[in-house]
Image (cartoon, rainbow, N blue to C red):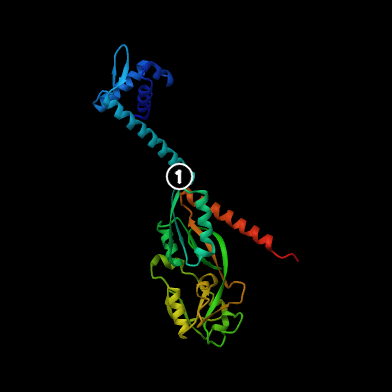
Amino acid sequence: MTMNQLQYFITAAKCLNFTEAGKQHFISQTAITQHIQSLEEQLGVKLFNRDKRKVELTPAGEVFLEEAKAILERTRIAIDKTERAARGEEGFLNIGYVRGTEHSCVKDFVKAYHANYPNIRFNLFRKPHLDLLLHLERKKVDLVFNICYSDSEIGDFEKKEIRRYPLCAVLPAKHPYAQLSSIRRYDLRNEQFFLTRYYEDVLARRYEIPENFAESGFIPKVVGTSADLETILLLVSAGIGISIMPEYAVQYFTKMDDVVFIPLEGPYEYISISAIWRKDDDNPAVHKFLEVVDQVNARQLEKQAQVAPVN
């Protein structure tokens, strides 16, 4: 049974005239008859009653007519969806992001992307930064919005910087430096640090984000690690140690009375949030999403230029 045979049958059922059906498809009446006979043999039923005076559908033919129409329509939809998926306009997209970026940039990207490509279904995953890289390598996600320090190594992935955020020292409110407006990393050399947890997964070792402490002239005294920011903040607020976090992350905790956030001084005391994806990714929806990211960023830069003060 072929799509052509179904179309020939539908036309013959509409015309109830094999000669006319043949004309509409630019084939002979004999060819139409042969295709109908082939369908009847495959189905094991008679689809038409025909004699010298008239042609009419059998009860089985009437049922098959509706099903044949449904098959052709479903096939048309499948072809259309497949073509749209090949253009990145239909399909699936799995996106990962680190905490904080959902309000700072990811929300805007997802909103704009959905408006442009409503037929793309996507899942969102919020994970720690090293988990995101592991998920990307293992093809559990297509694209991630992830932390990249100034000297980050991210393996064989493509990367597009999206935003930059200053780093802050996180200190107990009663710390001697708590009233400073900014601070150098070196000034913290005698402190005890709580830092994000080092991942023991062998794949993660390639993605360990280098610290800037060595360049500042000291090795930190790390007294604890955690993948959970709230846990680190609890320990800092208890006066047990200090930490360093990006500005986008601490915005959730600025109302804490027993912790202060002080910007670090220096040209490299920042992290960037980048869109990262696999070089060999063949999902066209990824590249459509990146186009939307560029469009959103361009609009934001245009707005900033419009409100910038004139000297």
Query: Horizontal and vertical percent for residue 250?
Result: 52, 73
Q: Tell me the quarter of the image containing the N terminus.
A: top left
Identify residue type, mark 1. Answer: Ala
As rendered, which of 258 and 287 lies closer to the eye? 258
As rendered, which of 65 and 150 lies closer to the eye? 65
Task: Left or right? Give the position of 222 relative to 62.
Answer: right
Instruction: Check the image and report above or below for 65 versus 34.
Output: below
Task: Left or right? Give the position of 242 relative to 200.
Answer: right
Q: Residues within 10 Å of mark 1 (few under 14, many from 20)?
A: some
Instruction: Check the image and report above or below for 134 versus 174.
Output: above
Residue 94 occupies quadrant: bottom left
**Circle 1 SS class:** helix
Location of mark 1 (residue): 85
Instruction: Check the image and report above or below for 19 versus 132.
Output: above
Query: Horizontal and vertical percent for residue 149?
Result: 53, 68
Query: Horizontal and vertical percent for residue 307?
Result: 68, 62
- Residue positioned 30% across, 27% down in the render: 62
Q: Is any atom of residue 302 visible in this view?
A: yes
- Residue positioned 52% across, 84% down in the render: 173
Q: Tell me the quarter of the image containing the C terminus.
A: bottom right
Task: Left or right? Give the position of 62 relative to 305.
Answer: left
Query: Horizontal and vertical percent for residue 272?
Result: 55, 66
**Extreme residue toward the left, this view:** 44
Task: Left or right? Give the position of 7 relative to 213.
Answer: left
- Residue positioned 26% across, 28% down in the render: 43
As rendered, which of 110 and 288 lies closer to the eye? 110
**Extreme residue toward the top, this view:** 52
Instruction: Check the image and report above or below for 203 versus 37.
Output: below
- Residue positioned 56% across, 88% down in the render: 176
Total marks in image? 1
